Image (spheres, grey):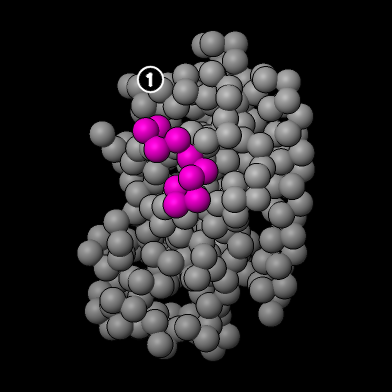
């Protein structure tokens, strides 16, 4: 209950942040200055570094709002002023594309990732991820499995698919602490509020308070692809320049350092 309650509180904080960023985005868009980016929460570390390097190189500035891809897609549908959307899965990019909210020619598959099972850094849990592995037993009597919302958040959807493929979802479905986005699921494990969690490999790499117990087989879930596109409402010429920069060799190390695969 404690983890769920704090996750809910954190969800409210994230929602408030995104709304505040949206207000800033509106002002910046009106001034024609910042490149406004809506990006999946798991991109924060890498994209912040890439953005800072681009700003230093060009003198241009960005404003980035991070949240679950589902929440960002809904904000795009609602008309939030922004220039670029980077989703953590293909379906949410398809969602905005079907509504003609992106410039189709600008869409590309930008990054790949992996999902992993994590525990606190001092945890003694040792599991081999395989068909029928004893995930329920590892949670103990009242432990929760931290995941992104399994119906909306990409990392949560990938995680559920993997657990179903491995035949363990029925045994743990009632023990899942569903978070608003993958970074919140990471936080629940990092703070010791959940003994185990499913996050992206890149999230695990960003937090020294957790360790990777094991990686889920690539064939146990849909391919993890981060598509990127310009929004159809964008009129900022610097937006295309930033997208182009993210695809250069200069930007590649920022993402590879966090564990992403840069797709060609």
In which quadrant of the rendered view does residue 11 lie?
Answer: bottom right
Is residue 25 positioned above or below 54 on the image? below
Q: Quadrant of the N terminus?
A: bottom right
> Which residue is located at x 74 percent, y 47 percent?
19
Q: Position of residue 116 (x, y in %)?
A: 38, 60
The residue that appears at 35% across and 49% down in the rendered structure is: 225
Residue that protrudes farthest toward the top in the picture? 58
**Percent coordinates x, y for residue 14 in the rendering:** 69, 53
What is the magenta range? Answer: 97-106
Q: Position of residue 158 (x, y in %)?
A: 39, 64
Q: Is residue 241 above or below residue 36?
A: above
The answer to whether 220 is drawn above or below residue 33 in the figure is below
Numbered marks: total: 1
> Is residue 102 within the magenta segment?
yes
Residue 43 visible (yes or no): no
Q: Residue sitting at 71 percent across and 54 percent down? A: 15
Q: Is residue 120 left or right of residue 201?
A: right
Q: Which residue is mark 1?
A: 250
Nearest the viewer among 261 and 3 is: 261
């Amino acid at each position: 209950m404690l983890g769920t309650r704090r996750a809910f509180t954190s969800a409210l904080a994230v929602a408030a942040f995104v709304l505040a960023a949206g207000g800033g985005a509106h002002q910046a868009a009106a001034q024609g200055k910042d490149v406004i980016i809506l990006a999946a929460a798991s991109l924060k570390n890498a994209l912040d570094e890439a953005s800072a390097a681009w700003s230093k190189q060009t003198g241009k500035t960005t404003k980035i709002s991070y949240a679950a891809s589902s929440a960002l897609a809904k904000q795009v549908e609602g008309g939030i002023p922004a220039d670029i959307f980077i989703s953590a899965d293909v379906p949410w990019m398809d969602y905005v594309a079907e509504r003609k909210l992106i410039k189709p020619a600008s869409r590309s598959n930008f990054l790949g990732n992996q999902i992993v099972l994590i525990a606190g850094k001092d945890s003694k849990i040792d599991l081999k991820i395989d068909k029928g592995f004893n995930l329920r037993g590892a949670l103990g009597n009242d432990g929760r499995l931290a995941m992104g919302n399994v119906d909306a958040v990409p990392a949560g959807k990938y995680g559920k698919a993997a657990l179903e493929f491995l035949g363990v979802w029925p045994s743990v479905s009632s023990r899942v602490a569903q978070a608003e986005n993958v970074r919140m699921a990471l936080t629940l494990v990092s703070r010791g509020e959940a003994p185990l969690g499913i996050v992206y490999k890149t999230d695990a790499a960003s937090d020294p308070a957790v360790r990777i117990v094991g990686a889920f087989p690539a064939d146990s879930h849909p391919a993890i692809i981060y598509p990127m596109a310009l929004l159809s409402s964008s009129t900022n010429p610097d937006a295309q320049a930033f997208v182009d920069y993210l695809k250069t060799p200069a930007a590649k190390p920022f993402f590879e350092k966090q564990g992403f695969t840069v797709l060609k």
